[in-house]
Image (cartoon, helix red, strand yellow):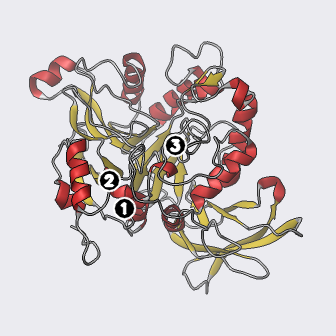
Amino acid sequence: MDELSAGSVDLRVWFGKGAAMATSRRMFLRGSAALGMSAALPGVVGCAPPPDPIGGPAPFRHGVASGDPESQSVVLWTRVDPTDTQAAATVRWEVATTGGFDHIVSAGSAAATQTRDWTVKVIADGLSPATTYFYRFVTDTATSTVGRTRTTPSGATDRVKLGVVSCSNYGYGNFYAYRNLAARTDLDAIVHLGDYIYEYAQAGSGETFGEFRPLDPPTEATTLDGYRRRYALYRRDADLRELHRQFPMIHLWDDHEFADDPFIGGAVNHQPGADGDWGTRVAAALQAYDEWMPTRVSGNQIYRTVDFGDLARLVLTDRQRRYIWPEPDDADLYLGHAQFGWLDQQLAESTSRWMILGAQTTFGSTDQDIASGGWGALDRQRVYDQLAAGGTDNLVVVSGDTHRALALDLIDDPTAYLKDGAGTAGVELSCGSISSPGSNLLNPGPGVRWNSGFDRTYLVLDIDADRTRSEIWGFFDFGKYLPWNPGEQLLAQFTTQTGANTLT
């Protein structure tokens, strides 16, 4: 167990760590009072949040980032603080095999302009597979911090380790889980399953979801300027900046990158009178996303695959597409017809040892009937059928959105499963949330092996030819309000043997 600073109290010991973490609010407040502080929860008077961060050193206050790695290339990103007299800033980027940059293997220059909010996004190519590189950006007067990235393997691959995260609400607490994940040295990439930003306003400025840290803009993000400022606020957070600096990120948006719970023609958190035209808002959110995120995404198509040699294929799906950009007859399929046709092909043609399906929210059923919830029974069966037609026998689903970390068997034959534990088609691990609050499942179905919504968590997938080990790391929710990092502990660990499609 990690030690906290001298003189502090380890809240993980103070509150206890049961599997269910069913800690009552009374115990929560009693524990915080014993520590000499009040619980800084929304609606509860507590200690003042830390001041709005200013970010890193100028002119690269928003740090550096990399993403969407391939075997011979990776996306690099930064932003240059504008000056009053600049029309554009020329930025040189460099990639090297060491942090001293004594052997530069790829380099170039790009312009930071007001048109793209002074962000720079380039593709560094000519790289070698499964190799760690260091990169930086240079202007005439300054050099950025040094970032670290890694290309994906090609061909025969022994092992891959991925960190999986979702749901980072700035207003609802500190991003200590990002910092804990960034401190690791054994990951190939970070998979982010969405809700990277939240569009809500701060207290007194509109509809609010999280009041612990002040927001910029203080009002809801609905315009291009608003979304740009919200991304800028997030990237001034030291914990998120460090995560981006250490690892390439493979990102999948969910709803809050636009607005809460889209439907065809709008969203639950979009009021046409106050928030303007829905299509204009979506276009603004897309432009800010393209400027600020280190992805190769073109336009509005974010579903894509990332191959890790012959060991694993990561397939990322987009549940929002059929609502925000509907096509004819999409409504009867969870992903819509065009995307599901693409998914059929990815599943059936894959020869990877493991299929890792990235879903923005729960894929399998967590209910007692082992059928309702998740993607829907017919959609799940279509995935199972396509996998059976292809060359991959092992399915691992990773999901986010619910603010709940969970582990479940994906059951395709309930009778066999209830009899002797057979009848599974795969497993699912949900990564929980970085700061957004959650709760436990009240009446989990028989396929649910573990769940906790009272911890702020991330997931690590350790994949080799024989098994996938899934680790859920985190700390009790209250820790996100503390002025120090509460550390973390291993909350749950499961292993899935090749060919077994069940959690042990």
Q: Vertically, is 431 above or below 366?
A: below
* Residue depicted at 29% across the width and 45% down the height: 454
Q: Which of 28 and 225 is in front in this view?
A: 28
**Res 357 quadrant in image:** top left
Mark 3 or 1: the one toward you: 1
Measured Cα–Cα span from mark 3 to mark 1: 23 Å
Along the horizontal axis of the image, is 346 left or right of 374? right
**What type is the residue that disc 2 sits on?**
Phe
Q: Mark 2 points at which residue?
A: 478
The disc label shown at residue 454, or none: none
Choose top left, top right, bottom left or bottom right for residue 411: top left
Q: According to the image, label 1 marks what residue? A: 482
Nearer-the-camera pick, 78 or 16: 16
**Left or right: residue 23 compared with residue 235:** left
Disc 2 to disc 1, C-alpha distance: 7 Å
Label 2 crowd (10 A; few <14 / some 14-19 / many >=20): many
Percent across and percent down for residue 297 are: 65, 45
Which circle's residue, 3 or 1, is located before the other in the chain?
3
Task: Identify the residue at image location x=41%, y=32%.
Answer: 390
Would you say the residues marked 3 and 1 are in contact, meaning their CB atoms lie under 8 Å apart? no
Task: Tell me which amino acid carries mark 1.
Answer: Leu
Q: Is mark 3 on a helix, strand or loop?
A: loop
**Which residue in the protein does label 3 denote?**
195
